[in-house]
């Protein structure tokens, strides 16, 4: 295939960027989207031009490092991570627009790389169970009904890529946060800190500049792990509950 | 020059023989008393003093994150580093299948001793008994710890934890979280780490790459790192340095490792005097998605757990290889693992399954592009258990497969082929996990310690977390108890020298302005390694490879093209540094593989086989750890042997038949 790529180029966080046009030929449908960009970069280097900076690491859809807005969609036209998107989803002659995640809480560092430390700070605010090493009881001391275990797992599947934020017109991080609150809140071990957790995570979320949720559901549709919108309802319920406990 | 070298000729040609070494930190006595003894004898640091002691930890995978969290909880001052934008993205996240522990929750006869025995046998009798026993012993605490953190392991309807079996063993001792065990364990450790960051005990530096170790008066005292966003070169000093930087499988270019996995942290330490042990021990995983073309940037693992329900086969007749597999009737299929290894069948250890796949493909019976693939078929499992049940166990793996190949594995058998997956070699450490440089500790895949010549499935996660949560925090205190050590000024000549060497190297990369991209060198190195230091190794091939790598390295330093500047986010520059180190490592791996004139575990020398073609160990001459000392840029490495003594397990030729 022969494709035209419109790619966001930006020197650094402090400079302004612009879209730039590239034509790439001989793209095979077995390539992943990022392998297609690798090929472009090899060509750019040969020509003496600065290659396009983009993040990726595991390239197995699990580390959450990659993430591009492709033709206006977070992670592109399929429900998966950018690294698992393959060129068989495109056809010869296509024009593809490639941009970084766009959100106030994710400043662009260079080209397609953004800074997502705000997500880590939300976890720091309470996205954990306090269990110092060595103090744990036997793993079978607490039984967990399979339904709760499965729902906890569903929340725990979040890879922290930030697609939910990029897809949301309000750039809200509620799906990310709701997933963690659901993961920990479904487990018996997560109960003691349940109220405090939701209150401080929500405070941190707002302080980072993420927007509010207006129930559009774009986040869940873009989520490569299919995390459902109802984790946000669970978070809201937990928040109310915490408030009613005077937290 | 293609003359075959005998062991001694190779000796004189590529390396120097040095003094033997020993693990001085391991206690003697009954095996089950050794770890309690060491924990008791290791000096304590009183809680008030811990705050004054600083620890640098490079890496936030299972090993690094668990160590940083635990040391932070204990009250030490920890500085943690990773090259990704968040500690949660370390490559441990990609582990799929599970983690072993000798809980014996299934009541099928498991015990610490059995896990110890299986691991030593699986490692083909090339690991240390003391270390492996300790690993088995602490495995149970890991599961307790992870459950307390909220790791959502698979459960049965009654609420109890579920287990499955994994390659190379006959009990069910593997705990798992669907096909995302590594992710769930790492998120647990990451959350514990973030909690300590919030508490102020851990200072986190993401997008920072360690490029040099700082040694002062013979001790590890700090690191030089590059801020990967601004390009600034920073100096970080501490009382001790821990490397948890993962494995070096990317020396093969294509592997199941993440794009950024590299050897720089440990290689820089090696150049400063840390011995590198058994570099040639590489694990080739039997079940990966085959290569689809030249553009391929990495290979994707299909978890070994699939071998519990999937059956591996190729057509009996070469002529059937192009057919739709569903049209090949039962009698015309060769379920070769079940045929050759009836006792273990599809669950033989990885090295054996990989070589068997290579053999049938070499015979011309491989399937798919280039004939480099075998079938992994779920038709029987789907018939027996139903599609839903197969989906609930392996759904995410089947999705990955379909995404990459465009084929639906519920309908058509998967095609798989072996790929580089794990490196058992790494920096040499003693029982305390301290390297040959005082004050430098090495944990997780970055050290060499527990898996001998072949790692069993689900035991790397166990080792990483054992090292980080339970072993290192107990042994490093023996070293720290003598601190805090003298404060080192950033203008100390040793620090300045380290920082300048990093700056000069970066400047040099940018000035070469040659004609070839960094990736093209990396691919060329990978091809040499895969062809000549891969699944089958010969003296002839290895000798050639050493020459080819030397030439490639010389060309790299003359002709590589790195664009851009030093003081910005520059991914070509990052890769150049990593590839430069991988080139040096590749040469040492070939030298190690050449000198080890026996077959053991993942190291298969075509010259050392039994009558029926299985790997043949040579315990008389090679029952030792090969610890290599750096010999300078133009010199030869020096080999130090650490003898392996088996007091509790009898050495046997491995048999899975
Ligand atoms: C696809 C796959 C599946 C696997 N499945 C299993 C399984 O089911 N069971 C099992 O037991 N094992 C499995 N393994 C093996 C296991 O996952 C790894 O061996 C283990 O997770 C390694 O952990 P680690 O903490 O040592 O290193 P890693 O998780 O690789 O972490 C390395 C860390 O070091 C940092 N780092 C590296 N170099 C530098 C530098 N120069 N400067 C700064 N930071 C640096 C990185 O940023 C990262 O944080 C699997 C491996 C792969 C690749």
Image (cartoon, grey):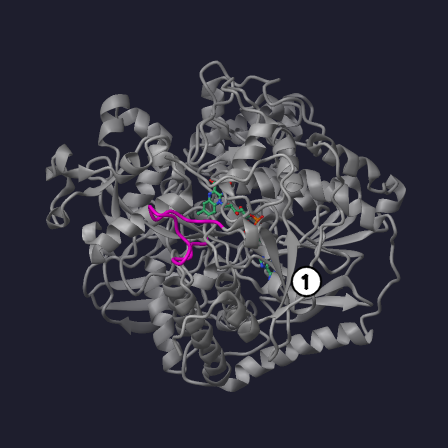
Instruction: Determine whether B316 is above or below B223 in the image.
Output: above
Q: Residue furthest top?
A: B158
Residue for badge 1? B274
Instruction: Determine whether B379 is above or below B60 in the image.
Output: above
Query: Residue B263, how many percent across, how many down?
Result: 56, 62
The chain identifier of the residue carrying mark 1 reads B
Q: Residues within 10 Å of mark 1 (few under 14, many from 20)?
A: many
Please count the marks in the image. 1
Secondary structure under the numbered disc 1 in the rendered image = loop
Residue B641 vs residue B483: left or right?
Answer: left
Query: Residue B554, how many percent across, how many down?
Result: 49, 82
- Is residue B638 one of those drawn in magenta? no
Please state, as top left, top right, bottom left or bottom right, where the N terminus of chain B lies in the image: bottom left
Q: Main secondary structure of the magenta part?
A: loop
Q: Residue at x 78, y 38 (%)?
A: B38
Instruction: Determine whether A18 is above or below B83 in the image.
Output: below
Please state, as top left, top right, bottom left or bottom right, where the C terminus of chain B lies in the image: top left
Instruction: Determine whether B533 is above or below B459 in the image.
Output: below
Q: Residue at x 72, y 28 (%)?
A: A135
Q: Is residue B574 visible?
A: no
Q: Nearer the viewer, residue B32 or B198?
A: B32
- Residue interval drawn in magenta: B603-617
Query: Residue B109, how many percent across, how many down?
Result: 52, 20
């Amino acid at each position: 295939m022969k494709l035209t790529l419109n790619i966001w180029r930006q020197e650094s966080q402090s400079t302004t960027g612009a879209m730039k046009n590239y034509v790439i030929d001989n793209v095979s449908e077995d390539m992943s989207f990022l392998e297609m960009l690798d090929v472009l970069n090899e060509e750019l280097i040969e020509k003496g031009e600065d290659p396009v900076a983009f993040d990726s690491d595991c390239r197995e859809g699990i580390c959450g490092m990659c993430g591009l807005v492709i033709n206006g969609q977070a992670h592109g036209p399929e429900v998966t991570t950018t690294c698992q998107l393959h060129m068989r989803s495109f056809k010869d002659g296509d024009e593809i627009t490639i941009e970084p995640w766009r959100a106030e809480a994710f400043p662009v560092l260079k080209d397609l790389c953004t800074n997502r430390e705000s997500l880590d700070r939300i976890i720091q605010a309470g996205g954990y169970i306090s269990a110092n090493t060595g103090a744990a009881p036997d793993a079978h001391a607490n039984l967990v009904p399979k339904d709760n275990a499965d729902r906890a797992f569903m929340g725990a599947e979040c890879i922290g890529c930030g697609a939910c934020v990029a897809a949301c017109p309000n750039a809200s991080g509620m799906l990310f946060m709701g997933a963690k609150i659901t993961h920990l809140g479904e487990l018996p071990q997560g109960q003691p800190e349940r109220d405090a957790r939701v209150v401080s995570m929500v405070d941190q979320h707002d302080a980072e500049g993420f927007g509010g949720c207006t129930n559009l559901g774009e986040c869940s549709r873009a989520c490569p792990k299919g995390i459902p919108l109802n984790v946000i309802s669970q978070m809201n319920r937990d928040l109310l509950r915490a408030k009613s406990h005077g937290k | 020059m293609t003359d075959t070298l005998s062991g001694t000729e190779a000796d004189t040609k590529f390396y120097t023989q040095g003094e033997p070494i020993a693990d001085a930190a391991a206690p003697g006595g009954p095996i089950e008393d050794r770890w309690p003894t060491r924990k008791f004898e290791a000096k304590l640091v009183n809680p008030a003093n811990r705050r004054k002691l600083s620890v640098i930890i490079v890496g936030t995978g299972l090993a690094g994150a668990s160590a940083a969290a635990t040391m932070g909880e204990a009250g030490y001052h920890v500085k943690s580093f990773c090259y990704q934008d968040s500690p949660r993205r370390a490559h441990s996240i990609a582990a799929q299948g599970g983690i072993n522990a000798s809980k014996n929750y299934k009541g099928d006869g498991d015990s610490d001793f059995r896990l110890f025995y299986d691991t030593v046998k699986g490692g083909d009798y090339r690991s240390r008994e003391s270390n492996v026993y300790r690993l088995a012993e602490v495995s149970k605490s890991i599961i307790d710890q992870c459950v307390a953190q909220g790791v959502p392991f698979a459960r049965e309807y009654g609420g109890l934890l579920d287990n499955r079996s994994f390659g190379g063993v006959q009990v069910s001792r593997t705990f798992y979280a669907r096909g995302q065990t590594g992710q769930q364990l790492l998120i647990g450790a990451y959350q514990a780490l973030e909690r300590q960051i919030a508490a102020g005990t851990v200072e986190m530096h993401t997008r920072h790459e360690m490029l040099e170790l700082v040694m002062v008066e013979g001790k590890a005292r700090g690191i030089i790192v590059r801020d990967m966003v601004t390009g600034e070169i920073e100096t970080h000093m501490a009382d001790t340095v821990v490397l948890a930087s993962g494995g070096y499988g990317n020396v093969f270019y294509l592997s199941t490792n993440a794009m950024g996995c590299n050897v720089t942290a440990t290689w820089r330490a090696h150049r400063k005097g840390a011995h590198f042990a058994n570099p040639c021990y590489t694990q080739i995983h039997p079940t990966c998605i085959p290569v689809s073309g030249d553009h391929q940037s990495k290979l994707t693992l299909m978890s070994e757990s699939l071998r519990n329900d999937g059956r591996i086969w190729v057509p009996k007749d070469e002529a059937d290889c192009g057919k739709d597999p569903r049209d090949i009737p039962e009698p015309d299929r060769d379920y070769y693992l079940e045929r050759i290894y009836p006792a273990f069948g599809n669950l033989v250890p990885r090295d054996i399954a990989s070589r068997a796949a290579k053999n049938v493909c070499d015979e011309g019976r491989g399937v798919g592009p280039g004939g480099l693939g075998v079938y992994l078929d779920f038709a029987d499992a789907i018939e027996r258990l139903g599609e839903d049940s197969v989906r609930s166990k392996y759904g995410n793996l089947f999705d990955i497969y379909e995404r990459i190949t465009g084929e639906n594995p519920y309908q058509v058998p998967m095609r798989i082929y072996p790929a580089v997956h794990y490196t058992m070699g790494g920096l040499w450490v003693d029982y305390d996990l301290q390297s040959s440089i005082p004050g430098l500790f090495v944990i997780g895949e970055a050290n060499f310690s527990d898996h001998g010549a072949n790692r069993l499935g689900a035991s790397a996660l166990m080792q990483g977390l054992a090292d980080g949560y339970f072993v290192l925090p107990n042994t490093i205190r023996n070293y720290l108890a003598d601190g805090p050590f003298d404060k080192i000024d950033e203008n100390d000549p040793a620090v300045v020298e380290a920082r300048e060497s990093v700056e000069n190297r970066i400047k040099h990369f940018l000035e070469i302005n040659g004609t070839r991209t960094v990736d093209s060198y990396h691919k060329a190195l990978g091809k040499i390694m895969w062809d000549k230091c891969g699944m089958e190794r010969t003296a002839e091939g290895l000798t050639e490879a050493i020459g080819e790598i030397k030439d490639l390295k010389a060309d790299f330093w003359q002709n590589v093209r790195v664009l851009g500047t030093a003081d910005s986010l520059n991914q070509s520059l990052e890769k150049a540094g990593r590839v430069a180190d991988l080139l040096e490592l590749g040469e040492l791996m070939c030298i190690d593989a050449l000198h080890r004139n026996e077959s053991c575990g993942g190291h298969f020398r075509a010259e050392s086989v039994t009558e029926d073609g299985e790997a043949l160990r040579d315990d008389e001459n090679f029952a030792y750890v090969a610890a290599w000392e750096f010999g300078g840029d133009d010199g030869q490495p020096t080999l130090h042997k650490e003898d392996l003594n088996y007091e509790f397990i009898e050495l046997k030729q491995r048999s899975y038949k």
